[in-house]
Image (cartoon, rainbow, N blue to C red):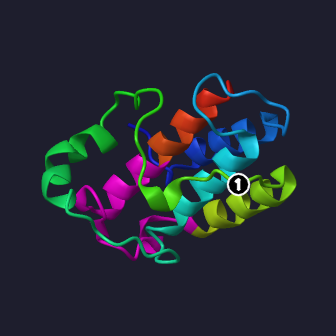
Amino acid sequence: MKSIFEPDAQKEIMERLNKLSSQTPAQWGKMNAAQMLAHCTLTMRVPVGDLDVKPTFFRYIGRFFKSMATNDKPFSKSSPTAAEFVISDERDFNIERSNFTVAFNKLVPGEHTVKISNHSFFGPMTPLEWGKLMYKHADHHFKQFGV
């Protein structure tokens, strides 16, 4: 599994971001491109400590599913997400692309950027696991938009 901390994976994500436009249609799901970028930005803010997501009761079972977050199998289409990451209001694509880039650039310098050792659902996470999850999540959503 690729990690967001790998230079080749970082380059790939940015190339895919540059192929996305406000008019790029989703192949599944409810979000448009701007909403998807806002969603991904929020998730990248968690491991660096810029967004606090409170653990839920489900964290006790989430640990049993942690391997799904870091293995090579892609996430399924329309996978559930935590309420904190649901974006349903309209967003400006250019602002969200900029916000994505800022959050991405703060996270990707290396595993040392990870300040949070517990995921709200999956439980204890190493920086390496965070890196894999962040890549897999971005990859999932860029595939959602065909880029």
Q: Point out residue 93 in the picture as x, y percentages from the top left corner.
A: 82, 50
Q: Which residue is the site of mark 1?
A: 89
Q: Quarter of the image for the N terminus: give it.
A: top left
Q: Which residues are magenta?
A: 107-134
- Give residue 27's quadrant in the image: top right
User: Residue 102 or 9: which is nearer the viewer?
Assistant: 102
Circle 1: residue type: Asp
Residue at image point 48% right, 62% down: 84
Q: Position of residue 146 (x, y in %)?
A: 67, 24
Q: Give neighbour class at mark 1: few <14, some 14-19, many 20+ (Cα, 10 Å).
A: few
Instruction: Say above or below: 58 vs 141.
Output: below
On the image, the x and y values in percent for residue 90 come to: 76, 52
Label 1 secondary element: loop
Locate residue 107 relative to residue 18 in the image: left or right: left
Q: Is residue 141 above or below residue 5?
A: above
Residue at 50% in and 51% down: 4
Residue 108 makes an appearance in the image: no
- Can residue 16 be seen here? The reply is yes
The residue that appears at 79% across and 34% down in the rendered structure is 19
